[in-house]
Image (spheres, helix red, strand yellow):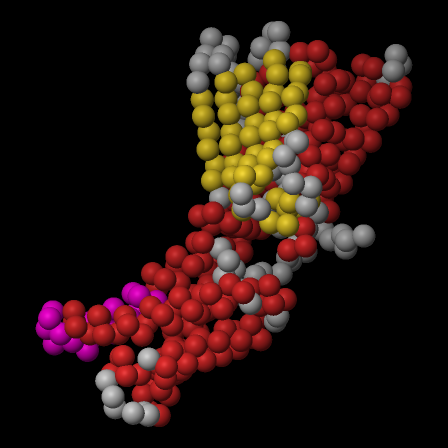
């Protein structure tokens, strides 16, 4: 059983970047080339000299950078387990070794037949190590800068889950059926207890998708107490990967928004369509609910949950996550796409 911790406890920061994240790779490529261009600009005396220097340096820089990214992609799992100083040491050693190897193998291509040049090899390996350390320092500062945002996102997720109207409505619904159907009332209280307990103790950045679906079903069963036949839900989970991991408190707030803004204002109710599926290496979550323009929406509803989801997706997956909203005359649809993370990668 996983260790349970309070929301007030600190969650360890990932001070080393995720080298399998597209946003991380793009930042490394842009920053590395930017540093190289800045250095060459300071050394050049003319634009023509700068052009020649850039072409000359790129012959070594680009192979080193691409090979280093490939090696770090392979080692990413081990780096995630290592202590920050150990991971930094490994990254620096990998970059220095690749720089030295490519420089020695392609020496004649880069510099002509000048033979073995220990000073040049040492200088390039040292420069590569320094650039690697600068990039690691940047990602460390970025992780520290985002730490308050992560904590705030966690608190907002709790606020989105423990909404007063949901608590009061659930209690009133349970009281209304307590005498006529005590077993159902007891089940509803157990479901509500599970919702609140999970919100208070779940410390992880990613949780199993099937657990999140189970929690969402419990929430919908509670809402069905007061909405009855007005609330219908169609689940499409045939292509849902059972071992997928997603950020916690994502699916339930989407469903709560669909109930509160889509189903509840409609006298006849409606159907919420939920579709979870895997397409290649991307996990898709779709929630669609009716939304009629002539029906006045709730004006006192807040958007903490939805903005919180966007923020947490950006923090966890960077540019690899997408949050799309489609609105027409009859429907409101949210489509979330995130990388497929298997349970063994937690």
Q: Compared to 310, does 10 lie above or below? A: below
Magenta-drawn stretch contains 3: no
Question: Residue 139: percent from the left, percent from the top?
Answer: 46, 63
Query: Residue at 40% of width from left, 82% of height from top?
Result: 100
User: Viewed as shown, does residue 86 lie left or right of 28?
Assistant: right
How many numbered marks, from 0 up?
Answer: 0
Q: Quadrant of residue 62?
A: bottom left
Query: Residue at 60% of width from left, 49% of height from top?
Result: 341
Q: What kind of secondary structure does the magenta stretch mostly adopt?
A: helix
Question: Residue 222: percent from the left, percent from the top?
Answer: 74, 24
Magenta-drawn stretch contains 40: yes
Question: Residue 321: percent from the left, percent from the top?
Answer: 49, 44
The one of 40 and 297 positioned closer to us in this rendering: 40
Q: Compared to 230, does 109 lie above or below? A: below
Question: Residue 96: percent from the left, percent from the top?
Answer: 43, 79
Q: Which residues are magenta?
A: 32-49
The one of 150 and 29 positioned closer to us in this rendering: 29
Asked whether residue 152 is in view, the answer is: no
Q: Quadrant of residue 177?
A: top right
The one of 197 and 285 positioned closer to us in this rendering: 285
Query: Residue at 64% of width from left, 36% of height from top?
Result: 240
């Amino acid at each position: 059983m996983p260790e349970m911790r309070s929301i007030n406890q600190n969650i360890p920061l990932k001070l080393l970047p995720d080298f399998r994240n597209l946003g991380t790779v793009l930042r490394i490529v842009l920053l590395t080339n930017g540093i190289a261009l800045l250095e060459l600009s300071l050394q050049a005396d003319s634009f023509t000299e700068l052009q020649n220097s850039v072409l000359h340096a790129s012959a070594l820089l680009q192979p080193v950078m691409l090979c280093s990214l490939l090696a770090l992609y392979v080692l990413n799992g081990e780096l995630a387990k290592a202590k920050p100083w150990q991971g930094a040491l490994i990254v620096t050693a990998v970059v220095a070794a690749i720089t030295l190897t490519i420089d020695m193998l392609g020496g004649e291509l880069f510099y002509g037949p000048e033979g073995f040049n220990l000073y040049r090899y040492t200088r390039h390996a040292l420069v590569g190590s320094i650039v690697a350390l600068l990039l690691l320092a940047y990602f460390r500062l970025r992780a520290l800068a985002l730490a308050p945002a992560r904590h705030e996102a966690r608190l907002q997720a709790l606020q989105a889950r423990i909404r007063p109207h949901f608590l009061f409505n659930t209690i009133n619904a349970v009281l209304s059926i307590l005498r006529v159907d005590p077993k159902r009332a007891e089940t509803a209280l157990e479901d509500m207890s599970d919702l609140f307990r999970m919100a208070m103790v779940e410390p992880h950045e990613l949780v199993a998708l099937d657990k999140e679906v189970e929690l969402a079903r419990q929430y919908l069963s509670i809402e069905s107490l007061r909405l009855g036949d007005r609330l219908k839900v169609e689940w499409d989970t045939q292509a849902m990967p059972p071992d997928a991991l997603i950020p916690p408190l994502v699916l339930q707030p989407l469903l709560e928004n669909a109930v509160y803004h889509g189903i509840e204002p409609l006298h006849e109710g409606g159907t919420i369509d939920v579709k979870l599926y895997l397409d290649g290496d991307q996990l898709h979550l779709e929630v669609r609910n009716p939304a009629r323009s002539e029906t006045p929406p709730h004006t006192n509803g807040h958007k903490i949950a939805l903005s919180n989801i966007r923020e947490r997706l950006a923090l966890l997956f960077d540019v690899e996550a997408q949050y799309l909203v489609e609105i027409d005359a009859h429907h409101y649809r949210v489509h979330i796409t995130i990388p497929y993370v298997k349970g063994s990668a937690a």
